[in-house]
Image: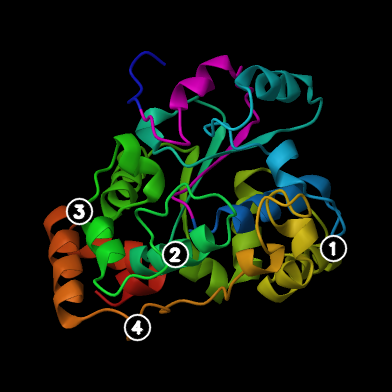
Amino acid sequence: MMHRKLYLGPLTDNRRWDMVAIRPDDVFVVTPPKCGTTWIQTIVALLFSGDPEVETELSVKMPWVDIRIREMSEVAARLEAMPHRRSMKSHTPMDGLPLDDQAQYICVFRHPLDAHFSYRKHVRNIPMPWFDPWYPEDDPDGLTFRRFLDGGAEGFDTDAMPLAHILQHYKAARAVADRPNVSLFHYADMTRDLPGTFAKLAGLLDISHGEALMKQLVQAATFDNMKANAVRFAPSGGKGFMKSDAAFFHSGTSGKWHGKLSDEELAAYDAMMDAHLTGDDRAWLEHGSVGTARI
């Protein structure tokens, strides 16, 4: 743990992981925000339980350890008291997490522009002005996108999710992707083949359910079902953490940034992506397996 990179932001403090005693069968869900975190957590909860009606209660049962909102002593005690297999969430890149040899690390990514525009909607749905300076509601001059491109990967910028932080997440995950207990998933692939995502994750977690039950679990994790039952599936659903639990599941689609950026903004984004990633890496980060198949 002494060699972990330090990530401190308005919400994030990855030193909190020092209080977690990792178990060999733990599952870490590691993602930038708005890249499918809740979706993959829900799939894990469904696979763990084998119950399509399970009350996921992700913020309590699969806690976001990095976030400063809850006292870490309480979070650590709750995790330690769990008699069953555990899963935990992190928005810290892999180089800031304790890397156990046996626990499973599920890293999930999404097209950076889709994640950015989804995050814009998300901050408007939170009744707290944490990121209003970065994400002003009225933004005729394009301040939000400039800060997305200019923000740093660490410090205060961490929790505002600039492109540099997404790239840091991706590079840190790729750096350890050769380990048998680190796996990368992509939102686009999950959208295209949800049953395949369930099957892949079940294999990684060494979980087996019958075909009929798996179909029920897959149906429970569809976007339409999660949105229709947002109080059940949204993080802290029904507790007033968000203005609208249903709005947390805004659309679940990709390409929502089309037509919303100028040619100059797109060129600046392209330049930053090309400066930091190879063609293969950029294709995968933006489009998943379909992207790399086109190269």
Q: Which numbered disc, 4 or 2, marks the residue closer to the eye?
A: 2
Q: Which numbered disc, 1 or 2, marks the residue closer to the eye?
A: 2
Query: Mark 3 = which residue?
Result: 150
Q: Is the C-beta separation of discs 4 and 2 under 8 Å?
A: no
Work out whether mark 4 precedes mark 2 in sequence or the reverse, and give the earlier one.
Answer: 2
Q: Name the disc covering residue 120, or none.
A: 2
Q: CA distance from mark 4 to mark 3?
A: 21 Å
Q: CA distance from mark 4 to mark 1?
A: 38 Å
Question: What quarter of the picture does the N terminus occupy?
Answer: top left
**Relative side of 260 to 102, left or right:** left
Query: Mark 1 = which residue?
Result: 213
Work out whether mark 3 precedes mark 2 in sequence or the reverse, and give the earlier one.
Answer: 2
Type of secondary structure dominating the magenta stretch: loop
Q: CA distance from mark 1 to mark 2?
A: 36 Å
**Relative side of 148 to 80, left or right:** left
Q: Residues within 10 Å of mark 4 (few under 14, many from 20)?
A: few
> Can you see residue 64?
yes
Q: Name the disc covering residue 258, or none.
A: 4
Q: Residue 55: x and y, percent? A: 84, 51
Q: Is residue 140 above or below residue 88?
A: below
Amino acid residing under circle 3 = Asp
Amino acid residing under circle 4 = His
